[in-house]
Structures are given as C-alpha cells and as structure tokens.
Image (tube, rainbow, N blue to C red):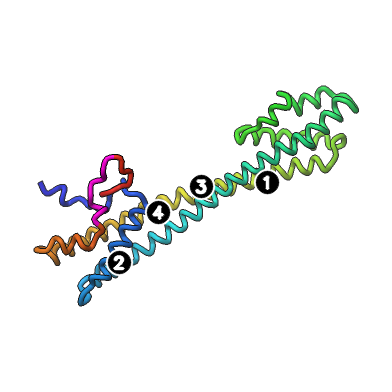
Amino acid sequence: MFLPFLKNPFASKKMARDDFRDLMDGHLSRLASQNKAGRYAAMIASLEPHQAAYHALLGEQDQNLGQRLGKTDTVEELLAEFKQFAKDELLVEAEYQFKRKKPNAEALTAFLPKGRKEYSQATLLTLPTLLQRVADLTQTYKAELGADLATKATDLQAAYTTARETQGEAKGDVQGNSKEEKKLRKAAARQLKLNLLDQVKLHIDEPEAVLALYDAKWFTKPAKGDVKSKM
C-alpha cells in the first residue's frame, strides 16, 4: 500500500526536458523566497549544482541541434547548386562536345544514362551518385570539357562530403548529449526527492507549506486534450 508513495514523482519520463528545467527553476525560486531563517538553505545548496548542470547541457543541446539543422540546409543548398550547374554548364557542354562537335555515344551515355531528368529531378538520395559520376567523368574527359568544368565538379563533391561529415558529427553530439541529459536528470530528480522528504519532515503537520514550494501545475492531472506533460 505504500509503494505509490515511495516512487519518485520527479522521475517521470513523460515530462519534457524544458518542463523539467522549469520545474527546478520554479522550485528553487520558491525555496529562496520562503527561506526564513535559512530553513531551506541546505536544500537550495544541494539542488543548485544540478540546476546549473542541466541548464548548461540544454544550451549545448540546442547549439548542436542548430548546427545539425544548419548542415542539413547546406546539403540542400548544394543539391540546388548541383542541379543548376548540371543544367547551365555540365550537360550543355557534354551534349555540345559529344553530340555535335565530335560525336561520342559512349561518353554521352556515360553522362546521361537515364537522360536529363536524372539531373533535374535529383534528390538528396541520388545526389552522392551523381556527384561521383560527374567528378569522375569530367576528369576522364577533361581534354574535351575543359579543366574549369572538372574543377567545379570536384569542388561540389568535396563540399558535399564535408557538409555530410559535419552533419554526422553534429548528430553524434546530439545523441551523446541525450545520454548525458538522462544522467543529469536522474541525479536532479533524486535530489528533488531527497529535498521533498526533508520538506515533508519539516512540515509534517503543514502539507500546504510543502505544496507552496511547487507550482501546482506539475501535480495536477492534465485535462483531456492537454498535451503538456504533468507528473
């Protein structure tokens, strides 16, 4: 019969990370404002390091996520740039050289195995294949197509490779931070519970005094349709 009361109410996995941060912030603020004669001083001192560490981690997570999203934008920009390059320069020159100036069906087929649509309808999924093909072929036929075209193709492929590598690193940072967040959150939830037990002992005959140390919204049952997590 005592099991429900022994569970840690702050360890809910349903609570969003920002909500958990706000719970700690609000609780510490209330402790500080009601810290008469220093009765909550030890609780404040024990919880503040957890608050600081959690705040720092969330800031780092947001930064890494922003970098990851930024690199996604970079890859999409490279896709658009490649399509424009293929339309305005690469295919114009390849068709001129191998279809009209000096017909070479083998070379033309190598560039256009599926026609122009393969380039105009390129996606992030097909981009690596197209970049590799174009980089290789412009080197093979550099004499006919010119060094400038070969250099542009190589530069585009290099830019794509760099963007993808950086994107992967940012993704790894986000995942790593997620593991660290769980660790910090578990420790903070434990300290919150320890403080709660001390508060209950301190106000054993005044439950309303304990409730006054927390925002009531964290302990109310959400109404139907309310998506915000509560404990």
Q: Which residue is mark 3?
A: 171
The residue under label 1 is which amino acid type? Ala
Q: What distance separates the C-alpha of mark 4 from that of mark 1?
A: 32 Å
* Residue 204 location (% of width, % of height): 11, 63
Q: Which residue is mark 1?
A: 159
Q: Nearer the viewer, mark 3 or mark 2?
A: 2
The residue that appears at 32% across and 49% down in the rendered structure is 15
The residue under label 3 is which amino acid type? Lys
Quarter-wise, where is residue 191 in the image? Answer: bottom left
Q: What distance separates the C-alpha of mark 1 from that of mark 2?
A: 49 Å
Q: Are marks 3 and 4 in contact (CB under 8 Å)?
A: no
Task: Answer with mark 2 or mark 4, whichever residue precedes in sequence.
Answer: 2
Q: Which residue is mark 2?
A: 29
Q: Nearer the viewer, mark 1 or mark 2?
A: 2
The residue under label 4 is which amino acid type? Glu
Residue 49 located left or right of residue 217: right
* Residue 163 location (% of width, % of height): 62, 46
Q: What distance separates the C-alpha of mark 3 from that of mark 2?
A: 34 Å
